[in-house]
Image (tube, grey):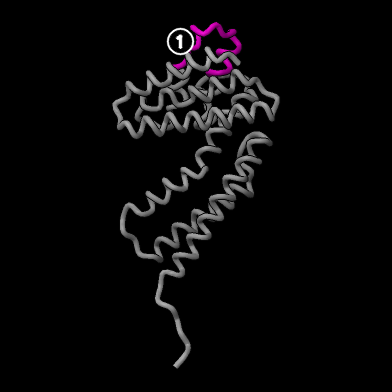
Amino acid sequence: MSKDLISRVNDFLIKHLNQADVKDSEIQYRYEHTLRVANVGTQLARDEGANIKVVTVACLLHDVGKYDTNENREHGRVSARVARPFLETLGLSPKEINDISYAIAIHVDGEAGYDYEETIESKIVTDADNIDRFGAYRIYKYMQHLHTEQKPIPELKREVSERIERLNQFRKDQILQTKSGNEWFNKQLDLGIRYYKNYMEQLTNTSLPILDFD
């Protein structure tokens, strides 16, 4: 894939994100998340025999319009509208532009807002986004959120137990859309399950020892 193409897409992404009226840390997270999604998507495209160019460009632009709407559910469709005029400057074929736009538009809730034939590339972009959302960094962010307020240990144990149950259900349901995506996602889920179970043990041990000697 052309390095120039990726460089131009990256420059457009950075420029647009930096126009958002949000904290620098938010922009940094969104950009770093995007890079991870693009790398995961590129590997999934190889594994699934999909169009690597379409997947990589779509992954890089999947959240370009994240801060152009106050409705999180809409940000895929908004991102597609932001990206399309730029895509038309890259010398891509009409089908490539349409496939990239569709993959971006549909990645949040499965709705593009218009009729289009589903593609393997769109499934991969959605899978790649979900894979990153359950990685090690999200465990860290969840733990930060869990401890934003001082909570009693029984409440912490309840919340963590519910989290483990949710991850186990995802593991059982195989919720992603591609075989390769589910295999990768399962590794992310297993990482989270192991971590939260270990944390539950620590919560259980956060108490006075029970002794039975006189």
Quarter-of-image position of residue 68? top left
Q: Depth check: 122 or 51 in front? A: 51
Residue at (43% x, 17% y) in the render: 11
Q: Residues within 10 Å of mark 1 (few under 14, many from 20)?
A: few
Q: Quadrant of the C terminus?
A: bottom left
Highlighted range, magenta:
82-101
User: Relative to 17, is 175 on the left or the right?
Assistant: right
- Which x, y percent locates residue 53? 60, 18
- For label 1, the residue is 85
Magenta span: predominant SS is: helix
Residue at the farthest bottom position: 214
Give the x, y percent position of residue 155. 39, 62
Looking at the image, residue 83 sits to the left or right of residue 126; the answer is: left
Q: Residue at x 53, y 59 (%)?
A: 197
Q: Is residue 31 above or below residue 148?
A: above
- Residue type, label 1: Pro
